[in-house]
Amino acid sequence: MEIVGDGFIARHLRPLAHRHPGTVVFAAGVSSAGSVAEEQFAREADLLYTVIRRCTADGRRLVYLSTCSAGMYGARDSRGREDEPVFPGSAYARHKLAMEAVLAASRAAHLVFRVTHLAGPGQRAHQLLPGLTEQIGSGSLQVYRGAYRDLLDIDDAVSIFDALMTVAELPQVVNVASGTSVPVEDIVEHIERSLGTVARKTYRQVAGAYTVSVDRLAQAVPEVARRVRRADYYRTVIDRYLSATRPSAPAATEGNR
């Protein structure tokens, strides 16, 4: 398969490059759900338009990586399902949904994977776990009380992508997530326990609870989805991240959780 992009996800997808002939994975573009200049959204859109035209012309299937973050599914009446209306609450999610609409209106064979917050070695510093780990290590951080995140290890995400691309008659849009949204405070607490330190905290109250349905994922690839649906899976994600990026950091054990 062809991989478009050279960022965090694209690099971890490279071991699959020999698989899925006739498929193009679009793993390029904006990587931050925060404040992003319109020019960055425009560059991603222009590149996607070019790839859509190429796939339409040569008959290859295009896989687009969208988002199932709180920005996409955080509306009060959202159930986090792929087959229901969504009301994006961030510029990033509105952009991703707009790109999905461009694909849906095109003649290109395509799939959309709405991807949750991924974690693993090689992430940019602004991503969730690198940012939290750095702040905790510095001794102080701001905690967004009321914010939630659904975490997925990058290796598990790649396994899911790989499995989904082999499924016949897969729905065109699939959430790729653990299905468990965890309070950011719990994530911070587990990082602190793993690192053996407690940072000084200031708090900002936000409304950030959301749900991501993984029913389609579980139906399509049950053996893969089952691994990530445990309520404590997020701890495994954090432990893997710290082990990969901080070899000297002691991993948390069952006894000190």
Image (cartoon, rainbow, N blue to C red):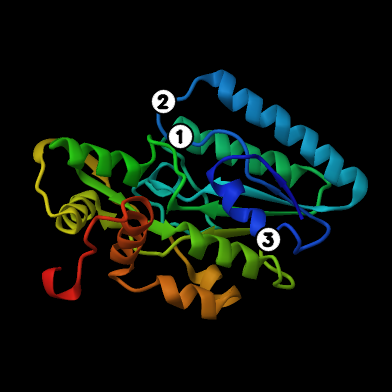
The percent coordinates of residue 50 (x first, y second) are 79, 33
The percent coordinates of residue 147 (x first, y second) are 25, 45
Inter-mark Cα distance, 3 to 2: 32 Å
Marks 1/2 in contact by CB < 8 Å: the verdict is yes
Give the labeled residue for mark 2.
Answer: 35
The percent coordinates of residue 15 (x first, y second) are 65, 59
Asked whether 91 or 39 is in front, the reply is: 39
Inter-mark Cα distance, 3 to 1: 25 Å
The local crowd at label 1, few if under 14, some if 14 to 19, many if 20 or more residues have their Cα within 10 Å, is few
Q: State whether residue 9 appears in this view.
A: yes
- Disc 3 marks a residue whose amino acid type is Leu
The local crowd at label 2, few if under 14, some if 14 to 19, many if 20 or more residues have their Cα within 10 Å, is few
> Within the image, what quadrant is residue 182 found in?
bottom left
Asked whether 10 or 174 is in front, the reply is: 10
Disc 2 secondary structure class? loop
Q: Residue at x 71, y 36 (%)?
A: 48
Give the labeled residue for mark 3.
Answer: 16
Left of 186 or right of it: where is 164? right
Q: Residue at x 52, y 50 (%)?
A: 85
